[in-house]
Image: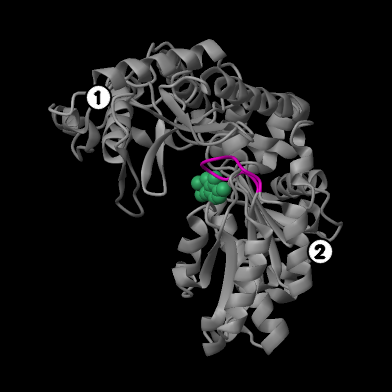
Amino acid sequence: MLLNAQTNVVIDHKIDQLFDSQSKYTYEEYIQKAVQYVKSFLDRDSFYSGEFISDFDSKRHFITPDPNVNLTIDEALQEIKALYLDHTIAFHHPNYVAHLNCPVLLPAIVGDLVASSINTAIETWDQSTSATLIEQEMIKWICTQMRLPRISDGVFTCGGTQSNFMALLLARDDYAFKHYGLNLKENGWSDVVSKFRFFCSEKAHFSIKKNAALMGMGYNAVIPVETDDKMKMKSDALIQAIEKEKQSGNIPIGIIATAGTTDFGSFDPLETIAQIAKEYQIWFHVDGAYGGSYILTDTHQHLLNGIERADSVTIDFHKTMFQPVCSSAFLVRDTEHFKYVSYYADYLNPLEHRDAECPNLIEKSIQTTRRFDALKLWFTLKMTGAKTIGSFLEKVHYLALDLYHSIKDDPYFEIVHKPELSTLVFRYIDLETDSNPIHDKINLYIKNTLFKSGQASIASTKIDGKIYLKFTLLNPKSTIDDLLNIIQMIKNTGREYNPHN
Ligand SMILES: *Cc1c(COP(=O)(O)O)cnc(C)c1O
């Protein structure tokens, strides 16, 4: 033990756990050991051990830190193996087809390790230097892919939810400023804002409504627009909804189109919606959290035509660019619009020191301290390349199509849509009944049974109040046989269902 004479603070040898030049060999040892344990996670057979929440009771002592005991690296890794690595959900497993979780690319993991170790905080130039340039270059790259104009810009965010929040905020504050001379950022709420309305399809992501609520506008400020049989926003219904709100004295201020809905992967007609937004002179946001990355494909690029006319765009790299969470971006057509979130703090980025040569990204961000998430994408584009990402995305789309063709004539399944991206929504049909409540029960039973037994993870969703199953395919290494294997499990489990159990 060292005794610091000046302060009488006792510092033990664990001071060596701080990352610095003296601990580099310990750093190497820890990382190498951690890698060995993560490899054991990859050696697991099932996507999930099936461990139930009550099973954790016997491992409480692993979960809770003991103030009197400090573990060695080996002990800590052993505990986390027993608690987590041996049991948790493996997104790379072919039987994991539930949510928008992709397998991740090794270059991106390296980027994450480097970013976490160096621990750059990207909000100001003086904390980040070249990291700021790398984030800006990644933003410029994706803006160029989207064919947004030169004055476009963007910022990395923690996810699509936050990106959508920024879109609604900029749209609202811009409308209030341009049409009413209001400065909401300075002065806060104004009564007229209660009349502001956003429009999105009824299949849009819930974060649109949630964000409207967080902004004090309430769920009711978001008007759901009817979709067609392909789950795309109907443009005539959009115009009718806008006109109806105007007639009741409300003020349309923005349209949110979805490029790849979470459940169906459907693309709203971006070009038509862009034109409608232009005619009403209101904000046009494209939520491409899921489908935005398909700009890198030959198969889907045309479905994104019109995105170049967007006022703002959401894209989630942690959904469809094979990046570890978090990695997401908010893009805006005109960098000027970031003024609605910028703040000049004396201690960080005083206005009088503003310097275009050495930008402070905090001026564009809701967060202050922010991770260098762009580094993962940098490693990915340098090592894997955008073309390969595009081919992965095409692969998972074709996989969804193959699955659709394989089961569409099967009487045991009712299929809701032909996949436009890489999801398939369907339900198991019990041929003996046409009761919807019974089908709801059977399909939930299938989902829960396969999950608990560690056989497969499937999602569920509701359409018109009825329960459906959902496959979300994001693993380019999966094969149609892997999927048909899950389909067989679904059939077997559905047949097993006994209403008296
Ligand atoms: C997943 C999703 C979101 C939310 O993104 P997070 O990164 O989970 O916050 C928003 N919009 C759509 C269409 C999505 O699929």
Bin the neighbour count of mark 2 within 10 Å (Cα to Cα): few under 14, some 14-19, many 20 and up: few
Frontmost residue, 353 versus 499: 499
Q: Residue at x 80, y 53 (%)?
A: 308
Q: Read off the residue under disc 1.
A: 51
Q: Read off the residue under disc 2.
A: 356
Chief secondary structure of the magenta portion: loop
Q: Is residue 390 magenta?
A: no
Label 2, label 1: how far apart the Cα atoms are: 54 Å
Spot occupied by residue 107 in the image (x, y as percentages of width and height):
64, 26
- State yes or no: Cβ of the residue under disc 1 lies below 8 Å from any atom of ligand 1: no
Which residues lie in the magenta part?
259-267
Quarter-of-image position of residue 448:
top left
Is 11 on the left or on the right of 340, as rendered? Answer: left
Spot occupied by residue 422 in the image (x, y as percentages of width and height):
59, 31
**Residue type of the residue flagged with mark 1:** Glu
Quarter-of-image position of residue 495:
top left
Q: Give the structural element (helix, strand or loop) at label 1.
A: loop
